[in-house]
């Protein structure tokens, strides 16, 4: 009798677990965020937070390196205007970006024709409207950004670094600066939900963030430089060459998809692997160079695309995936971000950079990876392989005001004040202030 009763109790528990599981799955499916954010971190999962390895969770190339929220004074805001900025904190920046990605996708996919606006209009969007500012540091073509976020297409063709979303009565306005002509544009969307964006921006508390154009003390800088009152305390990282020693090239070309049965290896002043018309050279400093020397369109790394915007997105994404295939398990706590896309007669030149917790890394070769796409395939690339690990200690940097004065003293007026890591091949990297030319 006791056995039958025990079995009945266990069966009831099993039924309850199944019912609870089904209920949980139903609730997840009904959650509003599932729709607009479903494509945000597809394929590789959420970007690793600071201190985690990118080999576990790599993310897309779409997460900004800096963001700011502006809530203008209103009857609902007893304390008046609220400004909250995030810089040099990749985890917090990613969390905010996740919240506004849905409205951003809606605005990009339903944007009206771009309308040129004045510099003053741009500044009002940053400081007087309910808005969110996104700084990607690199120059991201809008079709690529939307492709990463949702897989859909947009009629907008500009490459941008800085984007602003603002709330208006019946929709959302998308502001951006076109890096091609330097002008500011606004696109109105009557489809994007202003209430979703307003809700995503609500609840933040100010931290004193401001733009250089708002202060007479920073008039010599790029006016859109985002500043925080306190000096940052960036982490010191150890740096190393992750592909030193015997067998490094063999492991590398395996990750690239080379067949070892048809690949020959030899050494000159570099390690070399060759398979047919495809070759990879690996230097002692960890620089890998690929070259396709065939004349046909049947190289090892084809780009499959549909339409002009599809060709651009798929070229960038193919290069990013290829870069991740060799860097993700080797770069430690760094993450890749898109630096630039330059059109060439038969394709594109595409560059990626490393960042450490939202701070760009300056390498001797200027970028972490450079690809050349021609005739629908990758014909060349150069990847600088570096591995970074947090040391557990932070460094001191000058307060922003003193750093800005130092730039002016060096004759660097008009440039952006930016924290960067300078990696010249040593075993540690420490962040410091540098200048970024607005024309870069």
Image (spheres, grey):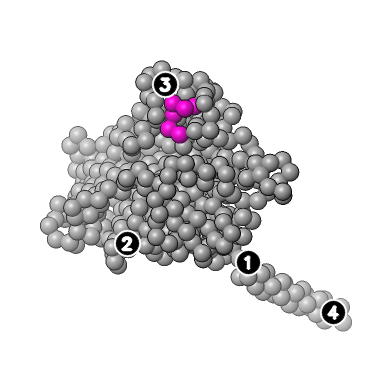
Closer to the eye: label 2 or 4 = 2
Where does residue 162 sit, x and y in percent of width and height?
44, 45
Where does residue 422 sit, x and y in percent of width and height?
40, 29
Where does residue 90 sit, x and y in percent of width and height?
53, 42
Labels 2 and 4 touching (C-beta < 8 A): no
Residue that mark 3 sits on? 408
- Tag 1: Cα neighbours inside 10 Å, few (<14), some, or many (≥20)? few
For residue 309, which numbered disc appears in the image?
2
Which corner quadrant holds the C terminus?
Answer: top left
Q: Quadrant of residue 137?
A: top left
Closer to the eye: label 1 or 3 = 3
| Rendered view: 281 above or below 39 | above
For residue 5, which numbered disc appears in the image?
4
Residue that mark 1 sits on? 31
Q: Is residue 380 left or right of residue 67?
A: left
Instruction: Confirm whether the magenta stretch covers residue 155.
Output: no
Closer to the eye: label 4 or 3 = 3
Residue 319 in view here: yes
Marks 4 and 1 sit apart, C-alpha to C-alpha, by: 39 Å
Q: In the orientation shown, which residue stands out farthest toward the left?
A: 295
Mark 2 element type: helix
- The magenta region covers 218-223
Residue in the picture at 49% in, 27% down: 218
Mark 3 element type: helix
């Amino acid at each position: 009798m006791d056995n039958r009763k025990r079995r009945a109790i266990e069966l009831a528990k099993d039924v309850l677990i199944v019912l609870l599981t089904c209920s949980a799955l139903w609730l997840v499916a009904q959650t509003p965020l599932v729709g607009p954010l479903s494509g945000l971190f597809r394929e590789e999962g959420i970007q690793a937070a600071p201190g985690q390895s990118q080999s576990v969770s790599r993310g897309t190339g779409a997460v900004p390196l800096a963001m700011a929220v502006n809530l203008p004074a209103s009857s609902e805001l007893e304390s008046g205007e609220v400004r909250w900025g995030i810089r040099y904190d990749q985890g917090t920046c990613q969390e905010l970006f996740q919240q506004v990605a849905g409205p951003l996708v809606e605005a990009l996919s339903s944007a009206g024709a771009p309308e040129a606006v004045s510099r003053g209009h741009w500044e009002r969007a940053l400081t007087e409207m309910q808005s969110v500012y996104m700084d990607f540091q690199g120059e991201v073509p809008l079709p690529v950004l939307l492709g990463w976020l949702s897989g859909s297409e947009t009629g907008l063709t500009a490459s941008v670094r800085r984007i602003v979303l603002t709330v208006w009565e019946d929709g959302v306005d998308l502001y951006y600066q076109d890096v091609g002509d330097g002008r500011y544009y606004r696109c109105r969307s009557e489809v994007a939900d202003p209430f979703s964006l307003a809700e995503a921006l609500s609840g933040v508390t100010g931290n004193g963030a401001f733009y250089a154009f708002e202060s007479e003390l920073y008039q010599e800088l790029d006016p859109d430089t985002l500043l925080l009152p306190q000096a940052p305390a960036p982490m010191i990282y150890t740096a190393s060459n992750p592909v030193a020693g015997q067998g490094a090239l063999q492991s590398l070309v395996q990750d690239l998809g080379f067949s070892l049965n048809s690949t020959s290896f030899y050494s000159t002043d570099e390690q070399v692997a060759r398979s047919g018309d495809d070759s990879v050279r690996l230097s002692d400093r960890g620089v890998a160079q690929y070259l396709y020397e065939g004349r046909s369109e049947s190289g090892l790394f084809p780009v499959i695309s549909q339409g002009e915007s599809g060709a651009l997105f798929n070229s960038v994404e193919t290069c990013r995936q290829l870069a991740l295939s060799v860097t993700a398990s080797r770069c430690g706590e760094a993450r890749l971000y898109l630096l630039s896309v330059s059109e060439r007669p038969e394709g594109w030149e595409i560059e990626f950079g490393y960042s450490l917790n939202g701070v760009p890394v300056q390498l001797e070769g200027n970028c972490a990876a450079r690809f050349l796409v021609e005739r629908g395939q990758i014909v060349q690339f150069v990847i600088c392989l570096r591995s970074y690990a947090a040391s557990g200690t932070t460094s001191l940097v000058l307060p922003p005001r003193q750093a800005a004065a130092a730039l002016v003293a060096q004759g660097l007026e008009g440039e952006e004040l930016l924290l960067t890591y300078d990696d010249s091949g040593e075993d540690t990297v420490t962040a410091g202030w540098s200048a970024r030319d607005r024309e870069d």
